[in-house]
Image: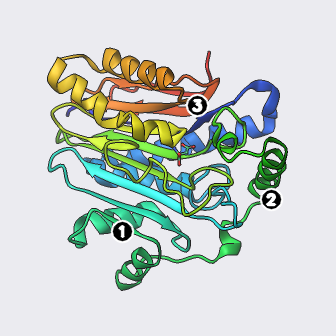
Amino acid sequence: MSSNFGIAIHGGAGTIVKMLLTEKMENEYQVKLKESLKAGFDVLNKGGASLEAVQAAIVVMEDSPLFNAGKGAVFTNEGTNEQDASIMCGKTLNCGAVAGVTKIKNPIRLVSIVMEKSEHVCLSGTGAERFAKMHKVDFADAEYFYTDRRWEQLQKAKKKEAVNGSDYSQLDHSDDTKHGTVGAVALDKDGNLVAATSSGGMTNKKFNRIGDSPIIGAGNYANNKTCAVSTTGHGEYFMRGVSAYDLSALMEYKNMNLKDASDEVIRKLGELGGTGGLIAIDSECNVVLPFNTSGMYRGYKLGDSSFEIGVYKD
Ligand code: ASP
């Protein structure tokens, strides 16, 4: 039986330092990351498809209030939760995405249906929700997504904005209030790579801002010839750098290996002034999880039994 399969996940990158995280919270994160990895790995281990594995892993994180996706999504300036998500299959280059949905319990379930059942790649707002209704996707009301922690983060961001007088400062991803986007990348026993990303975006975002998470090539990309990649961090920079596709392109056109190509992408992100990280897996089951912030919730579990969970830089 092939041991050349595995999954990697992230739960967001940002200012994640021991000082800001209680031991209890750190434990809670580790438990959820393990649960998410197990959910995805079990699918792959039984011979299931990477498409199912990434969804199983992400649903665990979307259902947890710890992460900025699904329950626990960050608040917009108007006090709403607008979620973005995407999924891509490396075999077919088929993909699906949604942007700015407010009522979908698990956006990652919806994007796979957009990919398979709609003639479009990306649906947004109320239109995406009408499509979701047609396909009997689970809905949730505003109370379901609400958490005190995220609400307080919005109040803090607004106060800071009142002092700084600038919208842009509110998009500073070095702030500890912004991280938490979730992502998963997987290679199954058939050699198929899939990437998925789901996010509430950034605290205090305005004007129906859409982040990198639903943008194929920026926050998410998969190609069986190269790798599957999901990003997290200050989305505007991942969009400007077309970072997820850039990683794949460096491998395809420059013949770079996954490690060198991903280091190059993070280097370029930093050069632009962006902060964040990514997870990626290639067709030989190599995994990388680089980031330029002080921490990134992350982990991987592979068919050869290697397993790791991480929070801080070292
Ligand atoms: N990349 C996401 C966005 O900009 C946020 C994050 O990853 O924390 O919407």
Residue annotated with mark 2: 148
User: Which one is closest to the eye, mark 1 or mark 3?
Assistant: 1
State the quadrant of the C terminus: top right
Splitting the image into 4 quarters, where does residue 238 fall? top left
The residue type indicated by label 1 comes to Leu
Q: On the rendered structure, is 139 left or right of 161? A: left
Q: Name the N-terminal-most of marks 1 and 3.
A: 1
Element type at mark 3: strand
Residue 45 appears in the rendering: no
Relative to 120, does residue 289 appear above or below in the rendering? Answer: above
Q: Position of residue 133 (x, y in %)?
A: 41, 83
| Mark 3 neighbour density, 10 Å: few (under 14) some (14–19) many (20 or more) | many
User: Which one is closest to the eye, mark 2 or mark 1?
Assistant: 1
State the quadrant of the N terminus: top left
Dot label at residue 218: none
Element type at mark 1: strand
Relative to 196, does residue 20 appear above or below in the rendering? Answer: above
| Distance between mark 2 and mark 1 Cα atoms | 29 Å
Q: Name the N-terminal-most of marks 2 and 1.
A: 1
Residue annotated with mark 1: 123
The residue type indicated by label 2 comes to Asp
Q: Position of residue 224 (x, y in %)?
A: 18, 38
Residue annotated with mark 3: 296
